């Protein structure tokens, strides 16, 4: 049996999404999502608002975060993204639990590292005669400021003609104004998540330029429980390849729209996924939602 009412990957204005939490939650509800996770990049600042909004819409909320990690395996030459791997972390616990305070403190350190990095990139741009108002960039983010906020400002300034050009010419990996920042390894990030009672899923593996077998064998060796096989950036063939290979290795699969707003991924939810293969904690949330009639 399959379902399409689980969305475990979405972003708000607390990182690089264009919708605030309330609008995003309403969009999830409108599209029939019953189990939702807000997974902003390297920040948990939206969790309380998301939990409240989900409750108001009758949606089961699973606190989540997308952690930016050091690449674990060198990519092939045709990789879409080489600079980082993204680990989705989920915490089926009360937000007040002691373990949650610890993990949120660690994640806050990752969030804070983004500020100095942004200042340094803006300084580098100035050496090329591109003078960016840092305040305007910071104003675009409610929580974790990142390169997409700077790209949007460069686009508005007329420095580039497209959002992608900002990355290609100026702030992408290896570009002249990019600055690396401290990132955990997959092993460190997953260990911290597990210590807090959470579980993990590797986001959109298609972007890393590594064979499916290599990726999944690595996840198994690290005790990472799942992989995001059902993602909007995956072709049907690739999705099926990752799903079947994951099941063969005893791994779960997750589904996520990676919704950043209507300009990017128009519809939250609508990612059919086999119920038997999603993580047990997600199945329980979905069953609880059915039982309560929400």
Image (tube, rainbow, N blue to C red):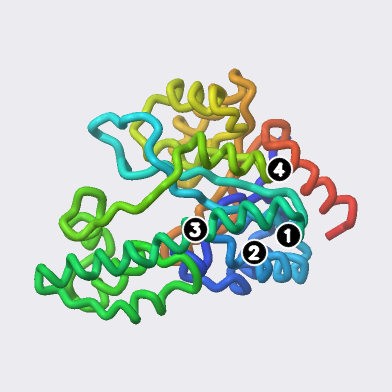
Q: Residues within 10 Å of mark 4 (few under 14, many from 20)?
A: some
Q: Which mark is residue 47?
A: 2
Where is residue 230 drawn, in percent x and y? 54, 40
Query: How far is disc 1 from disc 2 in space, using C-alphas?
Result: 8 Å
Query: How far is disc 4 from disc 2 in space, using C-alphas?
Result: 17 Å
Tell me the mark number nearer the camera, choosing from 3 and 1.
Answer: 3
Determine contact: label 1, label 2, CB under 8 Å: yes
Residue 2: image quadrant is: top right
Q: Disc 3 on helix, strand or loop?
A: helix
Q: Residue at x 34, y 65 (%)?
A: 116
Please give the residue where the numbered disc 1 appears in the rendered image: 95
Q: Residue at x 53, y 36 (%)?
A: 229
Q: Which mark is residue 197?
A: 4
Query: How far is disc 3 from disc 2 in space, using C-alphas?
Result: 17 Å
Q: Disc 1 on helix, strand or loop?
A: loop
Where is residue 267 drawn, in percent x and y? 54, 59
Q: Residue at x 68, y 50 (%)?
A: 5
Tell me the mark number nearer the camera, choosing from 3 and 4.
Answer: 3
> Which comes sooner in the sequence, label 3 or label 4?
3
> Which comes sooner in the sequence, label 1 or label 2?
2
Q: Which mark is residue 109?
A: 3
Query: How far is disc 3 from disc 1 in space, using C-alphas?
Result: 18 Å
Which quarter of the rendering shows the C terminus? bottom right
Determine contact: label 4, label 1, CB under 8 Å: no
User: Is the residue 189 above or below the residue 257 in the image?
Assistant: above
Tell me the mark number nearer the camera, choosing from 3 and 2.
Answer: 3
Where is residue 39 drawn, in percent x and y? 56, 55
């Amino acid at each position: 049996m399959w379902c399409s009412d689980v969305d475990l990957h979405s972003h708000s204005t607390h990182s690089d999404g264009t919708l605030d939490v309330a609008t995003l939650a309403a969009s999830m509800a409108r599209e029939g999502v019953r189990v939702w996770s807000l997974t902003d990049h390297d920040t948990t600042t939206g969790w309380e608002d998301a939990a409240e909004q989900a409750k108001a819409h009758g949606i089961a909320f699973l606190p989540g975060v997308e952690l930016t990690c050091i690449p674990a395996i060198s990519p092939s030459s045709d990789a879409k993204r080489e600079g980082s791997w993204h680990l989705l972390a989920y915490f089926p616990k009360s937000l007040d639990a002691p373990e949650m305070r610890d993990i949120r403190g660690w994640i806050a350190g990752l969030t804070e590292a983004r500020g100095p990095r942004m200042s340094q990139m803006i300084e580098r741009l100035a050496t090329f005669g591109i003078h960016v108002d840092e305040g305007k960039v910071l104003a675009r983010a409610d929580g974790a400021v990142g390169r997409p906020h700077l790209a949007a400002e460069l686009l508005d300034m007329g420095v580039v003609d497209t959002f992608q050009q900002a990355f290609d010419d100026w702030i992408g990996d290896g570009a002249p104004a990019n600055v690396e920042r401290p990132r955990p390894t997959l092993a460190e990030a997953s260990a911290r998540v597990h210590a807090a009672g959470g579980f993990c899923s590797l986001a959109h593996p298609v972007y890393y330029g590594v064979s499916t077998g290599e990726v999944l064998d690595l996840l198994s060796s690290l005790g990472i429980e799942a992989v995001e096989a059902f993602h909007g950036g995956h072709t049907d063939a690739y999705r099926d390849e990752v799903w079947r290979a994951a099941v063969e290795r005893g791994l779960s699969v997750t589904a996520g729209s990676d919704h950043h707003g209507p300009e990017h991924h128009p519809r939250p939810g609508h990612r059919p996924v086999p119920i038997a293969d999603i993580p047990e904690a997600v199945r329980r949330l979905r069953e609880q939602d059915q039982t309560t009639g929400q």
